[in-house]
Amino acid sequence: MSLTNRLLMRGIRKEYPGVCALDGVDFEVAFGEVHALLGVNGAGKSTLMSILSGATRMDGGAIFINDKRLDITSPHKAMELGISVIYQEFNLVPHLTVAENIFLGREPRKRMGFVDYRKMYTGAVGLLERLGAPFSPRERVADLGVAQQQLVEIAKALFKEARVIAMDEPTATLSMKETERLFSIIRLLKAEGKGIVYISHRLEEIFEIADRVTVLRDGRLVETCSLQGVTRERLVEMMLGKALEGAVPGGRGERPFAPTTGHEVLRVEGLTRRGVLEDINLTVMEGEILGIAGLVGAGKTELARALYGLDKIDEGKVVIGGRPVRLQSPAEAIRMGVVLVPEDRKRLGLVLGMAVRENISLASLFRFSRFGFVNGRRERMTAGEMVESLRVKTPSLEQQVRNLSGGNQQKVVLAKWLLRGARVLIFDEPTRGIDVGAKAEVHGLIRALADKGAAILLISSELQEVIDHSDRMVVMHGGRITGELSKEEATPERVLFLAMGGNSR
Ligand SMILES: Nc1ncnc2c1ncn2[C@@H]1O[C@H](COP(=O)(O)OP(=O)(O)OP(=O)(O)O)[C@@H](O)[C@H]1O
Ligand SMILES: [Mg+2]
């Protein structure tokens, strides 16, 4: 095989205490190609990219561009060699402007060493225009949305004249429209001869954008192949090492249970938070999963936050179990049995420096305690059962959550709240970043909670996920509910129409 026009990683090994994250993996990306990297949670995708970016040192293996062996000893070195890795948790400095972020560390200088702001801003305008970015380089990064921050990361890579750009789950937080725009940018970069590595759990995306795919499983290379002539089922099989039982997620699942016509657990009347949410009305019954669909930015997370006592409500009423409540803090919400499983697992759901066991039991310590002493054995057993049933990939219960892969961290958040038990559970994007194998399990668990009588709000920007897994749904757009659909009425076209702001009334 010729070594020209490509970046090649050969025999890459990386071990962590108790885990072999990469076991002699070969990977390559050609210039002018989009190469997808696929694998279930914990397969080693992010670790491979982290090695490429210079953030993680490999234990063995070699990296080449063309025939030249690279010595990637630091992120700075990787950048000099033309390699940019864009993580899902961006590496931007929030209080600096867009331009300052793009040029960080390599600002154009005037004589005497002063930063040449004029040159910097004109340069930034040029880069942003190339990407069709609809914002000014003078904006503070903190004021931008996720999709826009991502464009800043890409502009940064362009400025550094990266030849290889890797994106780790870039669309996880993007709306459909934003994803489309990202794809056109990726096509542009590809046409310019860049090598793009693309990580995603969404197979449709991989078929749409990638030329070839490499599948990893348990830190090993399974196969590299062209996407032409490979089926979705075959890819899933490569990822899991076996065929997936039942329908492949993304197809239309059967609803396994009928909703109970029990008691009303949650009622929201005229809830308004000025400028954010307007006149929200909904009810959720015992044993029911109410889906909340809408594109990114529709106000779904804002609604979840308001119901969880994180944000102030200006008007309206919340009734739980027949009693009007005023939820002014998450502590109060939890006391009333309302729990939010947040989308931003790093900031809201987990204590990264603590063990898997502690994170799971934290919200339920009262269950294991008597007279102020925690029964450690019971705590470990219960946490162990949760880890097993959700198939959290971790070498032990004592592993720090920080060291788990992205999807496995999300499973720990779920475990914590599943254990806590609650009357109203709000799931905000519960399967974001979760692989095909575990997605079905998460949906199964949510359904199991409903069957135990919980009232569930299932929030997702993946319209199909809401359609497939809720008993009834409301659709949001611009902070309002634009329509309510029964299971039978909820076709993808209808939901999309409402999500784009169409009104059913
Ligand atoms: N710093 C670390 N310390 C210990 N173990 C780690 C560390 N980083 C990663 N691991 C382990 O290495 C394995 C591979 O993780 P990696 O993050 O590469 O998975 P991934 O394929 O990106 O998964 P996901 O789809 O969930 O993001 C996992 O078992 C993970 O727990
Ligand atoms: Mg990852």
Image: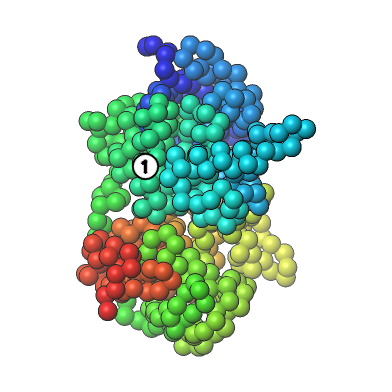
Q: Position of residue 7 (x, y in %)?
A: 46, 21
Quarter of the picture holding the N terminus? top left
**Some atom of ligand 2 lies within 8 Å of the CB belonging to the residue at label 1:** no
Residue at 45% across, 77% down: 278
Residue 478, placed above or below residue 229: below
Residue at 61% across, 53% down: 140
Q: Position of residue 180 (x, y in %)?
A: 35, 47
The type of residue carrying mark 1 is Phe
Is residue 380 something that shows in the picture?
Answer: no
Is residue 114 something that shows in the picture?
Answer: yes
Q: Name the side, left or right, on which 270 lies relative to 330.
A: left
Q: Position of residue 429 (x, y in %)?
A: 44, 58
Residue 477, placed above or below residue 407: below
Residue 148, placed above or below residue 87: below
The quarter holding residue 313 reads: bottom right
Disc 1: which residue: 183
Count of all numbered marks drawn on residues in the image: 1
Residue at 58% across, 76% down: 312
Quarter of the picture holding the C terminus? bottom left
For the view shown, which residue lies furthest in the bottom direction? 323
Q: Position of residue 467 (x, y in %)?
A: 30, 63
The quarter holding residue 124 reads: top right
Q: Which colour scheme appears in the figure?
A: rainbow
For the view shown, which residue lies furthest in the right direction? 112
Q: Name the side, left or right, on which 505 lies relative to 57.
A: left
Q: Please tell me whether mark 1 sits on a helix, a strand or a loop.
A: helix
Residue at 48% across, 65% down: 301
Q: Residues within 10 Å of mark 1 (few under 14, many from 20)?
A: some
